[in-house]
Image (tube, rainbow, N blue to C red):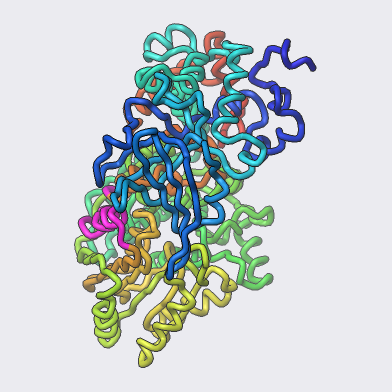
Amino acid sequence: MNNSNYTFDKNTDIKFLKSVGPKRAQALYQNDIYIISDLLKHYPRRYLDRTNIKKISDLTVNEKAVVVAKVISMSVKRTKKGQFFQLTLSDTKQTIQGLWFHGVSWIMEKFNEGDIVALYGKIEFYQGFRIIHPEFDILDADDDPINTSRIVPLYSSNNVLKKAGFDTRGIRRLLIQVFKKNKKILLEFFNPSILKAEGLIDLNKSFYLIHNPIDQYSIDTALYRLKFNEHFFLQLLKALNKKKIESYKGKVYKEIGQYAIEIYKSLDFNLTESQIKSLRDIRSDLKLKKPMNRLIQGDVGCGKTIVAVITAAIVAGDNSQIAIMAPTEILAEQHYNSFVKHFKNYDISCELLISNINQKEKNDIYNNLENGKINIIVGTHALIQKKVKFKDLGLAIIDEQHRFGVDQRKGLLDKGNNPNVLSMTATPIPRTLAFTIHGDMDISWIDEMPQNRKPIKTELIYEENINTVYEHMKKEMDKGHYCYVVYPLIEESDKMDLKDAKSGFESLQKIFSNYRLGFMHGKLLKDEKNILMNKFINGEIQCLISTTVIEVGIDHKMATIMVIENSERFGLTQLHQLRGRVGRSTLQSYCYLIQRKNTFNSNQRLKIMEQTIDGFVISDEDLKLRGPGDFFGTRQHGYLNSGLINFSQDREIINRARNLAFKIIDEDPKLKLEKNKLIKSEFMINYKDMLEFINIG
């Protein structure tokens, strides 16, 4: 193929670009850049704008600044404590140093004398200006923004790409080549009326400007269009699923039934207003001909389980079966115990299906499910095995549903004739994000805690004050209460200076020599974990030292202290989940956040934990700080991999994209109209395999 005469399109293999070829293309393939459209979606991670650059002579101490200068010398310096790498740069008038105290052998290979380098960081002064551990980019001489009015896009590039010559400059050369050959690479899928109504620029123009910006306005308009695309197709996916679910016919449950009424009357506590509101929502759903598809979104310990129990009682009262699927055996056993407790006085059969029951019991369960003798089955993903068959599955309750993939959820629902679905999650998700992820579901919010619960007292503890925590733990255990200590790692790592769980357990055994301690981590076998858990619940262990395997699933009413080591290493949502392991009764509970590395950012984050126990407030802050990655895994949600989406800032775009997507599907449920054909084509290429309930191909 003659590259000089070839006009590229979006599906052209990247190896056909000039200077790439089959061998160098392997590095791009390894980074999911296979064709031209993949390259276009390798967006800049930031831009170097001459208006943000300072001359060294104009710098002031403690400010954060961008400096562009030439490398004039570099060396490795040795001290009593070790070694560091020193880079000296000059912009002809003065010099500045970049210092790296970690990864010296790695960093020293990055630079050559004469390189033009952009340094980013906080300015210090010691025998001249310097930046400790600066972020940096190596520029082409003609990219120097001091000498041009250009805004220079800078691209992410790992070692694989860099070794093949695809650093930020190499990526940029490829893109320049593509745009020179073909300025209309992509087919615009929105018709002119949508572009005008939504204030969107042309698709090809948005990609050109994101990689070749003229000014900040051009970046903003390009970003708006590209973000709108992603939010729109995500919402289109939800709209398609929701429309299809609404077309299904399910069993109607007109009566509440005696079981639900009697269980409600037998409760020794009052339901909160939001629990009652959720039950009303569910009651309305069950009266309809279409199956329920509802998510109960509630904080840790808010009382979602009793809502699920009463819902199950309505369905069981009409002789239909209920399946409760949980992500872990510990959580499944807890649900099983809750359901048995509430249904024990009624003619309702409840069984547990997990891996560690013997084959004879399993076979009995399979038979009794199929002939209808079992009313309620609780289990893990074991419920989606082929051997599991129901006589009449009327309700599927899926706990922590985001931990299951599309295929796993569908595998359970396919065992019934359009069963009702009640999903639950204790992972607090901001409302904007919840509507984005769960746009095909109706959502009920339980945003109140039971009235008899005392707020957990949370305190940030620095390393030097940790003995006060240990003394408090001893007092609580002497009262017959129980404690957790959670670590982020199992064994010490050279790369991460963390207080690890194994050595922590050994040191705590000495500190608490008169108390009974246990050590649980992810490498233990299931049986070993269960034995430890039972010992803790039964009081044979007073303090459980653990990794984050306890994040979801342990419910010990007498546990009153949660100690989280290296708390600065956890996300806020995860810290909140861990804190939720205590405070599960009327006892006053405490959470101590041990901070081993004190930085401004970690202080800011951890103080949020001190100030509020509201999971929704915390999740909103976590979203701003960390992005959406912690709320759901990329395996189930592959559309969140561009790096463009920012849910905490995109609320206006989300609303507009959602309104447009749902309007289109209301009018054209299978995207058959001529004006929607290109939208359908784009959707089928990128999102088809994420459809849960419908095939529009």
Please, is residue 541 above or below residue 424 in the view? below
Dominant secondary structure of the magenta stretch?
A: helix
Task: Give residue 364's position: percent from left, percent from top.
Answer: 64, 67
Please, is residue 522 above or below residue 153 in the view? below
Q: Residue furthest top?
A: 192
**Residue for point 67% across, 31% down:** 34
**Residue for point 64% across, 56% down:** 388
Task: Give residue 32's position: percent from left, percent from top.
Answer: 63, 36
Magenta span covers which residues? Answer: 598-617
- Residue sitting nearer the eye, 306 or 227: 227
Left or right? Give the position of 33 relative to 346.
right
Residue 443 lies in the magenta stretch:
no
Q: Residue furthest right?
A: 1
Q: Residue furthest front?
A: 93
Q: Is residue 243 visible?
A: no
- Residue sitting nearer the eye, 508 or 125: 125
Q: Quadrant of the N terminus?
A: top right
Left or right? Give the position of 586 relative to 7.
left
**Residue for point 54% across, 66% down:** 352
Task: Give residue 326's position: percent from left, percent from top.
Answer: 50, 58
Q: Quadrant of residue 431?
A: top left
Residue 603 lies in the magenta stretch:
yes
